[in-house]
Image: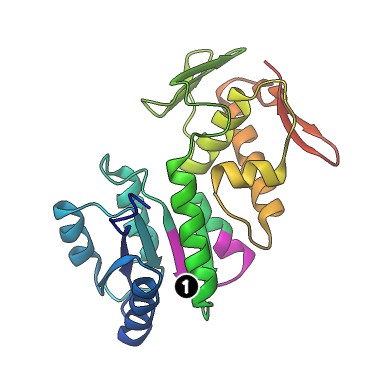
Amino acid sequence: MAADSEPALVYYVEDDDNIRDLTLYALKQASFEGRGFAHGDDFFAACAQAAPQLVLLDIMLPDTDGLQILARIRADAALRDVPVIMLTAKGTEYDTVTGLDAGADDYLAKPFSMVELISRAKALLRRARRPALGGNDPLVEGGPIALDAAAHRVTADGSPVELTVKEFELLRVLMQNAGRVLSRAQLFEAVWGSEFMGATRTVDVHMQTLRQKLDRARPDTAALIETVRGVGYRFNA
């Protein structure tokens, strides 16, 4: 958390009053400062006054889709780095990957355990405070690929490569650890910040789309990301 005397500020967007109140109570018991919102507009109005350190976001909302709210969070310079946990009744692998691919940091399906939610929240806040795997170099180059973390831009031989937040982070971690084999568990921890069932598949799905986008920008660029059978992935500059 921000400091021992200052509880982390957590915003929860959920239209069900009972679920929202119960979750906010659990957050308070765990020494978080929780604020709840039934609508996206109220949430963003509060963000304009004070940015949260963590967001809990339901997908199924009456006025707008939670994924649309997530997209606005990731497009906002003041909020883009705030960890987001998606909380929803949907629990299939497709929905999980969709939420993570849209920029969520973690995902819990309802009904969820308050103990597990608090554990995930603490893990994401710890990750947000510690240095990223491989350092924080703003500009990383490997072969024809250049990654500018400050501008959130990737190019291959000068051609722009449009990546999602998670694809960008996967590439950044791989490039900053060029030549080193990173396991799927290491990659998931570095990019998503926690563990959950299906994490291995999530990494593989995102790696597949990352490679496809690199190859579209410049053929054979994806070959720089090597699959090390039974271990994980390695970036070879």
In this view, 135 is above or below 141 = below
Question: Magenta stretch containing residue 197, yes or no?
Answer: no
Give the camera-side residue of 77 and 66: 77
User: Residue at horizontal 85%, vertical 42%?
Assistant: 230
User: Along the horizontal axis of the image, is 91 left or right of 45?
Assistant: right
| Rendered-image quadrant of the C terminus | top right
Q: Give residue 9's position: percent from left, percent from top.
A: 29, 59
Please state which amino acid type lies under the numbered disc 1.
Thr
For residue 196, which quarter of the picture? bottom right
Question: Magenta stretch containing residue 94, yes or no?
Answer: yes
Q: How was the colour assigned to the protein in this rendering? A: rainbow
User: Along the horizontal axis of the image, is 157 left or right of 62?
Assistant: right
User: Residue at horizontal 49%, vertical 34%?
Assistant: 131
The part of the chain drawn in magenta is 85-96
Q: Secondary structure at mark 1?
A: strand
User: Residue at horizontal 52%, vertical 64%?
Assistant: 119
For residue 233, which quarter of the picture? top right
Using the rendered image of the protein, determine whether residue 89 is visible from the camera's viewpoint.
Answer: no
Assess disc 1: are there few (<14), some (14-19) or many (≥20) residues with their C-alpha within 10 Å of its C-alpha.
many
Name the residue that disc number 1 marks.
88
Using the rendered image of the protein, determine whether residue 87 is visible from the camera's viewpoint.
Answer: yes
In this view, 195 is above or below 65 = above
For residue 43, which quarter of the picture? bottom left
